Image (cartoon, helix red, strand yellow):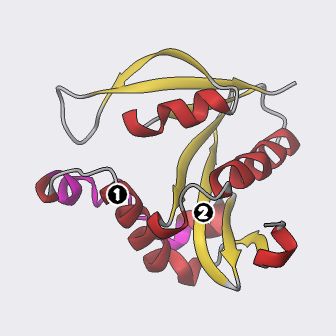
Amino acid sequence: MPEEARNLSIRPASPEEASLLSDLALRSKAHWGYMPEFLEACRAELTLSSDYIASSPVFVLEEEKRPVGFYGLRERVDDIELVYLFIEPAAMNRGYGKRLWKHLVETAAKLSPKKISIESDPYAESFYKRMGAEAVGFVLSSVQADRKLPLLEFHLS
């Protein structure tokens, strides 16, 4: 179905949406079947603050004026870090992640870094690779010390 027929739009997030977007991130992560204890341990990492939203590039994808996904970036000296990219579970597999990815690449390119760095959930790694990111190693999880997370990079041209 064409995007116009679905009434899709991407807009900047507002600081008042911090709780709504944090809840969406947690629901999206839960989609992968993680245990409740692990999800609870991830809660702080998946929580957006209103200050972060006010000071960083954070964008919301809406379908019929209802948030169905979002992403958030963090500017660093040598790159842009993709901090958040989450889709509402009921809206997965509709091309929304790809739509947000395209928007975030355009946003990052305007900020002039050479690359986007991604510490990926293992279940999302294949998505980022399909989008053109390359695996460059692993980082240790801040939630579970013995858990390695894929580290990917997307080079901007």
Indicate whether 89 appears above or below 5.
Answer: above
The tag on residue 10 is none
The stretch of residues the image draws in magenta is 38-51
Residue sitting at the far left = 37
Q: Secondary structure at mark 2?
A: strand
Residue found at x 76% / y 76%: 6
In this orientation, does residue 121 appear? no
Spot occupied by residue 68 in the image (x, y as percentages of width and height): 58, 71
Task: Provide the residue designation for mark 1.
Answer: 31
Indicate whether 141 appears above or below 94.
Answer: above
Q: Residues within 10 Å of mark 1 (few under 14, many from 20)?
A: few
Indicate whether 16 appears above or below 59.
Answer: below
In this orientation, does residue 147 appear? yes
The residue type indicated by label 2 comes to Phe
> Could you tell which of marks 1 and 2 lies nearer the N-terminus?
1
Quarter of the image where one finds residue 31: bottom left
Q: Residues within 10 Å of mark 2 (few under 14, many from 20)?
A: many
Spot occupied by residue 156 in the image (x, y as percentages of width and height): 81, 27
Task: Provide the residue designation for mark 2.
Answer: 70
Decide whether residue 46 is among the magenta residues. yes
Q: Secondary structure at mark 1?
A: loop
Spot occupied by residue 10 in the image (x, y as percentages of width and height): 76, 68
Compare residues 41 and 68 and report the one nearer the observer: 68
Residue found at x 62% / y 24%: 153
Judge left or right: residue 77 versus residue 46.
Answer: right
The residue type indicated by label 1 comes to His
Spot occupied by residue 114 in the image (x, y as percentages of width and height): 78, 25
Q: Quadrant of the N terminus?
A: bottom right
> Comparing marks 1 and 2, which lies closer to the viewer?
1
Q: Tell me whether circle 1 and circle 2 mark residues in contact (CB < 8 Å).
A: no
Q: Quadrant of the C terminus?
A: top right
